[in-house]
Image (cartoon, coloured by chain):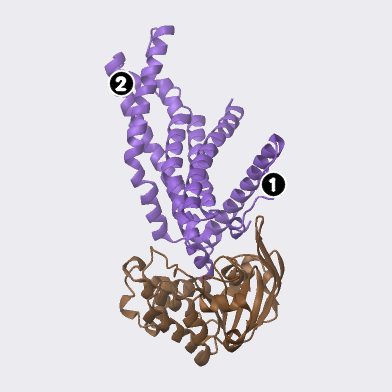
Chain colours: A brown, B purple
Amino acid sequence: MISFRNVCKSFGPKRVLTDVSFDIADGEVFFIIGASGVGKSVLIKQLVGLLRPDAGDILLDGDEVSRFDEEAMYAVRKKCAMVFQHSTLFDSLTCLENVALPLRKHRGLGPREALVAARERLSQVHMQEFGDRYPAELGDGMKKRVAIARALTLDPRYVLFDEPTTSLDLVSARRVDKLIRELADRLGVTCIVVSHDLNSIFGIATRIAMLYKGQVRLLGTPADFRGTTDEIIQQFIQGRAQGPMET
Amino acid sequence: MSVDANVETTSALPSEGGLAASVGRAVFEAIDSASQIYGVLVRTLYYVARARIDRDAVIRQMYEIGNRSVFLLSVVIGFIGMIFVLQAGLQMQRVIPDLTMLGASFLELLVRDLAPSIVALMLATRVGAGIAAEIGSMVVTEQVDALRMCGADPVDYLVKPRFLASLIMTTMLTLWSGAVSVGSGMVTAEVIFQVSPRTFWNLHLVHASDLATGLTKCIAYGAAIPIVSSHCGLSTFGGSEGVGSATTRAVVQSSLAVIVLNFIISSAAFIAFK
């Protein structure tokens, strides 16, 4: 279980998050949505210590991870993996070496052992034949699949997806959606997804939180979002240019 | 001491104000920056002592820092050797028309100061900029965050190999550059002042203390350049503009570090060996 309690975050004079609070239950596919720059990625990065909240608490399985130091955060990152927006594979490593890296660093496996396990992970996302290629030789969809394989190498209980379908074609995007849903349904992995993609949001979400002006505007199921009379939310989910929403 | 902290660096001081506020802000930022650089140095030394060393990564960085700098350094130090011998010879001719000590004075200066410092300033420009640009790009594309998610400390994974490679290659390049400079100076002395190579190659003024000073400078510069540049890269903020700014800061701060270290080591050597 993940809990955000009154989380605040500013960058210099710019206040990004103000008193953000909500809980995420185990096994959910939880979407965090909102306009660009509203602080969605900032919020999930605070869960794994890539950014620190200015105030408030973040709890993961009852532990106040927002108070952990960098050393203690490594344990959190073992059970809480992240797939970044632009895949962020390491250019100097092959796909196989990219996937093997968490096994070597977190689990302390030797190079050969880690590569064997990494090959298995790549085959789960149907990328085994590209293991010896470098990221620069792959398309965006393939890179994303390798990044997902890397995130899943340690069998995490929680996976954070930062705009997983951005820059993907529709078919690749829906494949990623399917993969996220399967993670939750078959393996019980809790997936937290930051996204603007309405197809993904209404296709696979268990619950949704919409951030607006640094605060939670609405927290609910996809049906709650469809049925709300809030003009700002309706404008966002219908993708209308005209309306009261400030960006 | 945590490197992640610098990603979020924001000035606590107001962005506007008078002269006093500007000076105060500059001092505050300098102290903050120095303490962060110290943090990176301590963590690097910790990982050098405690963690496994990736030999392939160090060798790759040695090639980047050393082999790819040889040509530039050879040309620059070769010309500097010629210029120094020419100017020194002309000045000596005015005062005492005896050039037998031309080589001896040049070699003493070369060993103690000229070779390590010129090499370090050139490396601060070429290598410092490269390190900051590479690490800075990784920061803005979230690759450094991804490293941390993979359980790898960026200081261990990115800074340590560059630090070790720089320590080794700065010393190697200084030795090579010294040889090139002696060669070019020797030719200049022979052609312009008719000082024979045998007369020029006079090591009477080069003492063990000069060698110790030169070697100390090599090690200090070799350590300072990657640490300062890596810190600039790791504290990159923003997009490509941020990478450009980090690169500029790396060159300026590394060069400044070389000059300050030169002063400190030269002063310490003067006191220790007088």
- Residue A2 quadrant: bottom right
Measured as percent of width and height from the top left, residue A165 is found at 45, 76
- What's the residue at 60%, 87% (across, down)? A227
A108 shown above or below A191? above
Q: Which is nearer the N-term, disc 1 or disc 2? A: 1
Which numbered circle lies on residue B14? 1
**Secondary structure of the residue carrying numbered label 1:** loop
Residue pushed farthest left?
B191
Nearer the camera: disc 1 or disc 2: 1
Checking the image for residue B188, the label placed there is: 2
- In terms of secondary structure, where does tag 2 sit? helix
> Do the residues marked 1 and 2 share a common chain?
yes
Label 2 environment density (alpha carbons within 10 Å; few <14, some 14–19, many ≥20): many
Q: Residue A80, position in %: x, y?
A: 57, 77
What percent of the width, then of the height, locates residue A187? 51, 90
Q: Which mark is residue B78?
A: none
Circle 1/circle 2 CB separation < 8 Å:
no
| B199 w.r.t. A72: above or below | above
- Dot 2 falls on which chain? B
Instruction: Quadrant for the C terminus of chain A, please.
Output: bottom right
* Dot 1 amino acid type: Pro
Rendered-image quadrant of the N terminus of chain A = bottom right
Where B190 sits versus A131, above or below? above
Visible residue check, residue B159? yes
Q: Nearer the viewer, residue B58 or B151?
A: B151
> Which residue is more in the foreground, B96 or B221?
B221
Give the CA distance from mark 1 to mark 2.
56 Å
